Amino acid sequence: MTLGILEGDDIGHEIVPASVEVAAAAAERAGLAIDWRPLPIGRKALDEVGHTIPDGTLETLAALDGWILGPIGHREYPKVLEAVNPHPILRKSFDLFANVRPTRSYP
């Protein structure tokens, strides 16, 4: 199984590596090998390569079995053409329509 790692912005640099650790431990316990592929997205990608979704990122994601995506802080991006919000592009490219977050209510 091959999974992408997209840290995103802000707290993503903390929570995505922790999520990968948990997923890797669960996969190891289940006897599943995962090939992790870090991919640039968001402000870090903009600063390093000049675009929030660098060339090849969407094509690489399409070839993966899945990915872990951190939060995107697009409201703080500079007002330049290359600083697009990645969310709508990901949703359209992969026909995604919901952001499901499991919750539990406590009395």
Image (cartoon, rainbow, N blue to C red):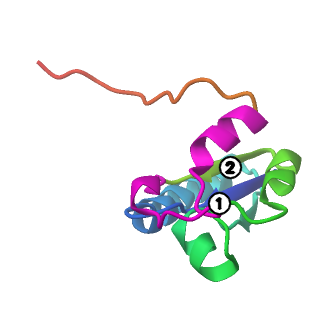
In the displayed structure, 62 sits above or below 82; it is above
Residue at image point 23% right, 21% down: 105
Image quadrant assignment for residue 53: bottom right
Query: What span is in magenta?
Result: 71-93
Residue at image point 63% right, 63% down: 52
* Quadrant location, the C terminus: top left
Instruction: List the residue tagged with mark 1.
Output: 5
Residue 42, image x and y in percent? Answer: 57, 63
Residue 45, image x and y in percent? Answer: 62, 71
Q: Residue furthest bottom?
A: 48
In the displayed structure, 2 sits above or below 43; it is above
**Mark 2 crowdedness (10 Å alpha carbons): few <14, some 14-19, many ≥20:** some
- Mark 2 element type: strand
Instruction: List the residue tagged with mark 2.
Output: 67
Residue at image point 49% right, 63% down: 79
Separation (CA) of disc 2 from disc 1:
6 Å
